[in-house]
Image (cartoon, grey):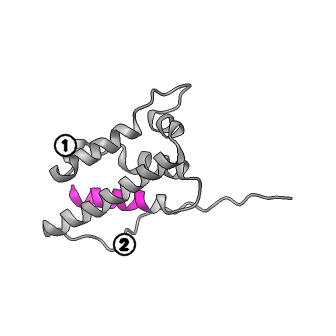
Amino acid sequence: EMSNHVKKFYTAVSVLAGHGHIKQRLIKAFEDNLAHIEDDTMPSALRESFLDLNHLMNQVEPLNGEGPICASVRKMSIDEADQCAQRILDLYSDMVRVSLDAGQPIPLKVEDRQVATPVLVNTN
């Protein structure tokens, strides 16, 4: 369970470090990797931080078929989105530390990560 969470957070951080607007990257990172992690499967030392992040990412009631994550991020300022991205990075870092303390091996590279090719805009 723990190594699976580490992989999910690693992939989320990789998305956050990619191309695109911070809000788009944040939505993709959270929806695709972290939204389905059950709170009670997180290490107890990280559970409160994860619950706080989950609350921030689901605090706005969705409209017009939009999901709560998309709605919440849409309402955030750029600074708030940056802070959420930093929380994800901090949780990943803490998760690696907890895993190492528990003696669990941490993959140095996640092989099955899908990298989206950036779309180039034709300016002609």
Number of numbered labels in the structure image = 2
Residue receiving disc 2: 109
Foreground tag (1 vs 2)? 1
Q: Is residue 81 visible?
A: yes
Please tell me the numbered disc located at residue 83.
none
The magenta region covers: 1-13
Q: State the predominant SS element of the stretch in magenta.
A: helix
Q: Quadrant of residue 13?
A: bottom left
Percent x, y of residue 118: 63, 61
Q: Are marks 1 and 2 in contact (CB under 8 Å)?
A: no
Looking at the image, is 116 positioned above or below residue 105? above
Q: Quadrant of residue 90?
A: bottom left
Q: Circle 2 sits in a helix, a strand or a loop, which is it? A: loop
Name the residue rendered at 21%, 55% in the picture. 1
Please tell me the numbered disc located at residue 40.
1
- Specify whether residue 43 is painted magenta: no
Alpha-carbon distance for marks 1 and 2?
26 Å
Query: Is 4 on the left or on the right of 23, as rendered?
Result: left
Percent x, y of residue 109: 36, 72
Name the residue rendered at 33%, 61% in the picture. 7
- Sequence-earlier tag: 1 or 2: 1
Q: Is residue 36 visible?
A: no
Looking at the image, is 92 positioned above or below residue 84? below
Name the residue rendered at 53%, 28% in the picture. 65
- Compare residues 123 and 93 and report the one nearer the observer: 93
- Specify whether residue 6 is painted magenta: yes
